[in-house]
Amino acid sequence: MKKAKALFFLAMFITGCLSAQRQPAFVRCKGQQFVLGDKPYHYIGTNYWYGGLLGLTKEGTQRLKKELDFLKANGVTNLRVMAGVEGSGNINGVQRVNQAFQTRQGVFNEDLLTGLDVLLAEMKKRDMKAVIFLSNNWEWTGGFLQYLNWNGLIADSVLRRKLNWDELRDYTSKFYTCDSCMLAYARQVNLVVNRINTITGVPYTKDPAIMSWELANEPRPMRPAANEAYKKWIKSAAENIKKQDVNHLVTIGHEGDQATDGDMSLYEAIHANTAVDYLTVHIWPKNWGWLKPETMSADLPVVLANTADYVKRHEAAAARLNKPLVVEEFGLPRNDHSFSPSAPVDLRNSFYKLILDAWKTKGVAGLNFWAFGGTGRPVPGQVFWKEGDDYLGDPPMEEQGLNTVFDSDKATWLLIRSYLKP
């Protein structure tokens, strides 16, 4: 009898161990680092915002598989991707990403999420992780401007024309006090977070291919007067996701104190929330006036000095909060501001090297360079994206090839691989 009991308990122990091994591993935070299971998760990633659109066609899926294989072979295992587009047509004077997920407020074309299903299923096969941003502060996917339009705070005629910077700030800041806008945003979030993958049958909330949910791409208060409402929205939106999904991390999608007019106290306050698991920064030297297209080489020392200071400043904030820091967007044009895939990238690579150095020392827990264009190529002689063109890393309103890293950029891939050596 004792022997039978011993064998029974041994069998139960083995079964329990095997069951534990079969449990999907989700990324967790441990102080200022990420962990996956019992091992550090210290990643190099990229922005691949259009990845969920490729899986909508047979041809696109073939490209997707090829590009995922390429990324995996080059040590890039974390992809920051878009959940979906709000609305259609021109917005803020530019063409937004096509194929609206939310076609009208509260009306969703859920078939478009099959592309995201395909992406996640293929990533899972390759042991890759996704960061999914759920809306956008900027116009190129509809985002907050579209919610404001749907709720009567921006007229159709105003939505379509090019806004000046002050107008854009004034309008976008109203999102955080527009209850109906925030409710509509939450409906989209809830639909995505609670989806069941049609390829694998796995609920998104239980999918180990997802690392984290991101409230939006670069949500800014836009005006200091909106700061308090902005903080409340972040708390509410993050807590809403946490209530529905206990497995995945949540982050804001923030650029850093550049987005809060230098207010580091606001940046720290919003990331101190217990529903926000880690900090992010984005670094855009050209957009922030650190370099000019015509003097890129001469301006590079300023770019590197400012970037180093920016990273260190936010590393200090992450240390104070004891949370990981991710540099999840950073981009620089090719030499001479060229859009050609054949143009040199040594200036960009110097910029990348500085951020890779910060990653190597583990002051930065993860990074996602902007952006992967893979096998796609811009149309010669054409500056902006048109229907039927390859998706690249550059959104439709930006010059195609501007910040994109192609599979042919051998020097950049060699640089990245050099940091993955023991």
Image (cartoon, grey):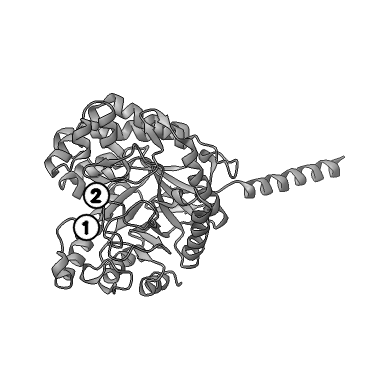
Q: Residue furthest right?
A: 1
**Image-quadrant location for residue 212:** top left
Image position of 17 (left or right of 389): right
Q: Amino acid at mark 2?
A: Gly
- The tag on residue 54 is none
The alpha-carbon separation of the residues under discs 2 and 1 comes to: 9 Å
Could you tell which of marks 2 and 1 lies nearer the N-terminus? Answer: 2
* Discs 2, 1 touching: Cβ within 8 Å: yes
Count the numbered circles shown: 2
Please, is residue 18 above or below residue 104 in the view?
A: below
Image position of 9 (left or right of 211): right
Q: Residues within 10 Å of mark 2 (few under 14, many from 20)?
A: many
Please, is residue 9 above or below residue 405 in the view?
A: above
Q: Secondary structure at mark 1?
A: helix
Instruction: Let me know if residue 396 appears in the view.
Output: yes
Q: Residues within 10 Å of mark 1 (few under 14, many from 20)?
A: some
**Which of the two residues, 386 or 49, is positioned nearer the viewer here?**
386
Residue 375: image location, x then y, percent: 43, 64
- The tag on residue 310 is 1
Residue 26: image location, x then y, percent: 51, 47
Q: Secondary structure at mark 2?
A: loop
